[in-house]
Amino acid sequence: EVQLLQSGAEVKKPGESLQISCQGSGYSFSNPWIAWVRQVSGKGLEWMAFIYLGASNIGDSTIRYNPSFRGLVTISADKSITSAYLQWSSLRASDTAMYYCALAEHGTAFWHLWGHGTLVTVSS
Amino acid sequence: QSALTQPASVSGSPGQSITISCTGTSSDVGAYNYVSWYQQHPGKAPKLLIYDVNIRPSGVSYRFSGSKSGNTASLTISGLQAEDEADYFCNSYTTGTIYVFGSGTKVTVL
């Protein structure tokens, strides 16, 4: 089965760090982009960051941040295992949300594969 | 980058057709034919319904169709069914932050 597998739910305290993951499986993806999407309970979807796994060297030119999230999170990837990561160095209560990863093939503009979501709860 | 504007809610009776609008600007919806639509049932991940304005992926019902005029895209659901009750989000490529979602529309089947 073609799927994006996300890491499990997390419960953290404010100020703690966290990294969540997303791995593609069941298919040989052709130079995909992977993005992270935030959804606060009862609210809409927000793009956070995008990373291109098809580059020979993943650098600044293959990473994009929604300005609303730049500096708050870090996106990274390991293209050898078709995986992407989202990292916080210091969590805040306002980071409490469901986080989805999504995949788009290079050269397309639609996100056809989604992970099941990772619920992050930040509470003292 | 502000979210694209969608009506908060749309409702219809079984068998009816409804249309959800998605209004953007000349930097996103109006600039590119890269509008996609996603359906999200409660507690589930979003699912791609339409891409490139009006193309249905394999496996998506013919009852879903998309269109665009100027800065506004639309999703039409014909022959409304109980299973169509969900949240719907449009999405567009943009010259700003690469992509931007719509504010979301809750569809209720009466």
Image (cartoon, grey):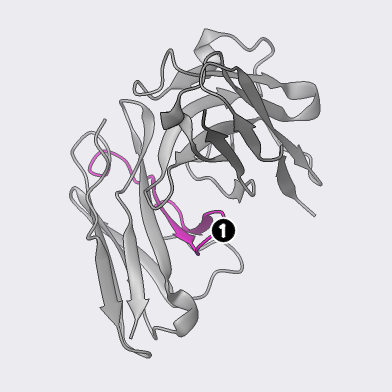
Residue A102 makes an appearance in the image: no
Relative depth, front residue between A30 and A121: A121
Horizontal side, residue B10 vs residue A27: left or right:
left
Tell me the residue at 24%/55% (across/down): B6
Q: Position of residue B26 (x, y in %)?
A: 18, 37
Host chain of mark 1: B
Give residue A55's quadrant in the image.
top right
Q: Position of residue A116 (x, y in %)?
A: 64, 49
Residue at mark 1? B44
Tell me the residue at 25%/45% (across/down): B4
Q: Is residue B54 above or below residue A38?
A: below
Residue A107 makes an appearance in the image: yes
Horizontal side, residue A1 vs residue B5: left or right:
right
Q: Is residue A1 above or below residue A75?
A: below
Tell me the residue at 26%/30% (across/down): B1
Q: Residues within 10 Å of mark 1 (few under 14, many from 20)?
A: few
Check disc 1 and report its element: helix, strand or loop.
Answer: loop
Q: Which residues are magenta?
A: B29-53
Give residue B13's quadrant in the image.
bottom left
